[in-house]
Image: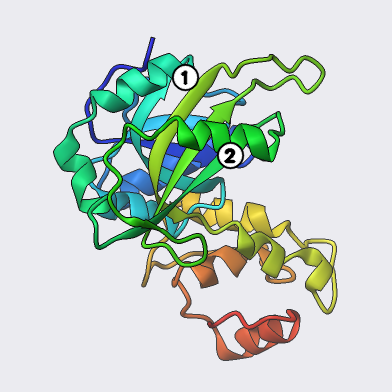
Amino acid sequence: MALPGPLNRYLLLMAQEHLEFRLPEIKSLLSLFGGHFTSSQETYGKSPFWVLNIPSEDIARNLMKRTVCAKSIFELWGHGKSPEELYSSLKNYPVEKMVPFLHSDSTYKIKIHTFNKTLTQEEKVKRIDALEFLPFEGKVNLKKPQHIFSILEDYGLDPNCIPENPHNIYFGRWIADGQRELIESYSVKKRHFIGNTSMDAGLSFIMANHGKVKENDIVFDPFVGTVYSILGLLKTHSNQMDKVLFKEAQESFSVPLDN
C-alpha cells in the first residue's frame, strides 16, 4: 500500500554514512527553520529514503542549505510498492498541484535513481515512457530544464540479495540538493597540515547543525586545536572569529573559509 498522509509530503534522499547522526541533524535543522519533524514512516534505520511532512517548500530549501546528511529533497507526488501502486498514487495527486510545473511554456527532464541496483538504459526509458499519463505539456530539456522530476527505486540494503522488483518506488519534483560537496571541499586530504585534533569535515558540519548554530551565535570551543571543529561554524555564518586565529585557519586550508 502507498504511504498515507497529507499531500505536502517530501522525500529526503539520505547519504549512507554517519547513520546515527542523520535523524538528529534533520530534526535539529527543521526546528531551527521553524518546522517540526513529522512523518507517517514507521522507521528510518539505514534506509536512504525518508518521507517527511514539511510545512513549506521554503523550509525544505533552508534545510538543504545546511544539511550534510541528506543528498536531495523532492516534493513527493506519488509512492507505491509496485509500478501499479505508484501510478495509482500519481493519478490521485491533485492536478492543480502539478500544473504550475507542467505547462506548455516550461521545460523539464525526468531522472531515475536506483538504490542497490543498476538499470539498463532500455529499462530506464521504459519507466519514463510509462508516465505518459501525466499531463506534461512542456518541452524536454536534458541540459538546463526548469523542472526536474525523479523516479526513485529502493531495492533494499543487502547487496548480496538484490530483489527483482523494488521494495518501494517514489516519484517527485526535485527541490534542492544538500551540502555534501562541502565534505570534499574541506577534506582532511586538502589541508596544508594535519594535527592530532584534526576532525573529519563532515562531522564538524554535523556538530554545527546539531547545535542549531546560526548567524551571530556565540560558540565556545575550549579544544579548538587545529581549527577543524569550528569549520562547520564558519560555514554556517557564526563567523565572528579572532583575526589572528582566522588567518591561521585560512592558511591551513587549500580553499577559502569566508566564501
Circle 1 sits in a helix, a strand or a loop, which is it?
Answer: helix
Q: Residue furthest top?
A: 1
Numbered badge on residue 173: none
Q: Is residue 87 above or below residue 161?
A: below
Q: What residue lies at 34% left-to-right and 25% top-to-bottom?
A: 39
Q: Please provide percent x and percent y for residue 6.
A: 22, 26
198 or 34, nearer to the observer: 34
Q: What residue lies at 31% left-to-right and 29% top-to-bottom?
A: 38
40 or 248, nearer to the observer: 40
Task: Report the number of numbered marks.
Answer: 2
Residue 113 relative to residue 138: left or right: right
Classed neighbour count for the residue bearing mark 1: other residues with Cα under 10 Å, few (<14), some (14–19), many (≥20):
some
192 or 113, nearer to the observer: 113
Numbered badge on residue 83: 1
The kind of residue tagged 1 is Pro
Instruction: Report the Cα–Cα distance between label 1 and label 2.
Output: 15 Å
State the residue position of label 2: 113
